Amino acid sequence: MRTQVGIVGSGPAGLLLAEILRCNGIDAVIVECKSRAYVEGRIRAGVLEQGTVDLLREIGVAHRLEQEGLVHDGVDICLDGDRHHINFRELIGKTVVIYGQTEITKDLIQARLAAGGNILFDAGEVSVHNLDTDKPSINCVINGSRLRIDCDFIAGCDGFHGICRDSLPAGQIKTFGQTYPFAWLGALAESVPPSKQLIYVRSSRGFALFSMRSRTISRNYLQVGPDEDIGQWPDERIWQELAQRLGEEHSACIDAGRIVEKSITQMRSFVAQPMRHGRLFLAGDAAHIVPPTGAKGLNLAAADVRCLAGALKQYYQSGSEDVLHKYSATALNRVWKAQRFSRWMTSLLHIYPAQQDFENQIHQAELDYVLSSKAALTSFAENYVGLPYH
Ligand code: APR
Ligand code: PHB
């Protein structure tokens, strides 16, 4: 098989890249190791920056998002039971939209298949080759048969555990990262969210987040230990803990409905750079991971592929690789700023182990300061709604 851009991975990064390319008349094939049902069933975050919404609109896949997405003017932060609203619209004239990443994935798959685009699901033994040449290829097994896809370029959109990053020659890429001494327990429930706002909570019992997927589906999170066993968290315990962290004054609004999915996610910050080797370009989680507190994961992936698609478009229009050469530096500029913000927001809202009690006090003081300063709130708003693209 032959294509212009071979894409490994049909998460948001791979799917979005393929759609932007299609809108620009550039051919792509996506190779995905999981099934369509698996990809469409994964529950993940749901806050979209304005830039991500605009991008989805530009490529014509924002139909359902326009109808079902919930526009949020800001978020609430609750510090030891004391609740504050941070209004992004008033501070900087911008908003975010709540719309599940699962739904974006479904919309993108549907749009691609309806337009006759190719997604090779359930691909086995995926590998990438000849990255240092102008004829790279993706090898895989589809329905028991070996397939080689010859490409002009390969986009490694195969997430943190994918094969693309590890296919680069040793020493070609430098990685940076840190893990956190806690994890998030996420619970999706058939319950009316306690507020129209997202509520980020810092309490002495740990962090909590009240989010939503719709007016009747809530998505809530609790800070738990890094090795926590989900088996120790029956539904009643989750609801009780959420209520305690939110505090007596507000917890009466919690509707403890049926929890339909719960899981524990480790927290880590990670960057691989450069995001390119030869004709392989990394995008999204394959190149970087942020802790979810700043809601940046999907938005960063969208910013990467927006930039990569622009560079590929330039190449196919002019034959010049100038913009492709700048891809890694341009993407990383934004990635590091989002890393900074995600770690900062994580540190302010979580409780670290007792050995770091000095830091815990400093974080509490900093959060208290942020909530009292228009300058600090403006900086928070600018970062949360998304920094400008280059
Ligand atoms: N071959 C083919 N596909 C692969 C391989 C492989 N060897 N390994 C992984 N994949 C697929 C995964 O099954 C997944 O569908 O690559 C896709 C990667 O998708 P994501 O993990 O969603 O990563 P990305 O598209 O970069 O999304 C970034 O989505 O999941 C969130 O936290 C993430 O919010 C961030 C955003
Ligand atoms: C979510 O709705 O899943 C969500 C919202 C905000 C975050 C992280 C996750 O910071």
Image (tube, rainbow, N blue to C red):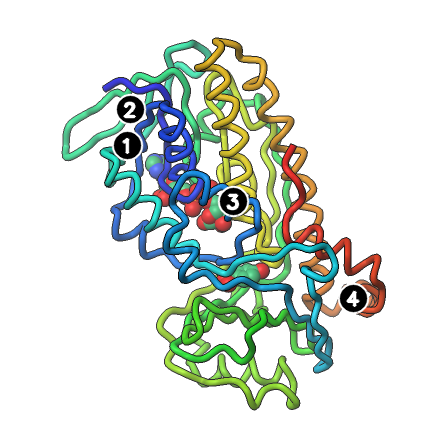
Which residue carries the number 1 mark?
125
How far across and how far down the image is residue 159, in percent?
A: 45, 41
How far across and how far down the image is residue 40, in percent?
A: 31, 53
Whether 213 is drawn above or below 333: the answer is below
Q: Work out whether mark 3 precedes mark 4 in sequence or the reverse, and give the earlier one.
A: 3
Q: Work out whether mark 3 precedes mark 2 in sequence or the reverse, and give the earlier one.
A: 3
Mark 3, mark 2: which one is toward the viewer?
3
Whether 217 is drawn above or below 173: the answer is below
Give the SS element for disc 2: strand
The residue sitting at 49% across, 59% down in the picture is 265
**Gap between marks 1 and 4, in whole Å?**
48 Å
Q: Residues within 10 Å of mark 4 (few under 14, many from 20)?
A: some
Mark 2, mark 1: which one is toward the viewer?
2
Q: Residue 139 carries which label?
A: 2
The answer, for residue 71, to whether it is visible in the render is yes
**Gap between marks 2 and 1, in whole Å?**
8 Å
Give the SS element for disc 3: helix
Q: Residue 367 carries which label?
A: 4
The answer, for residue 352, to whether it is visible in the render is no
Whether label 2 lies within 8 Å of ligand 1 gets the answer no
How far across and how far down the image is residue 332, in percent?
A: 63, 33
Ligand 1 in which quarter:
top left
Placement of the C terminus among the 4 image quadrants = top right
Q: What amino acid type is highlighted by mark number 1?
A: Glu
Q: Nearer the viewer, residue 380 or 351?
A: 380
Which residue carries the number 3 mark?
54
- The quadrant holding residue 187 is bottom left
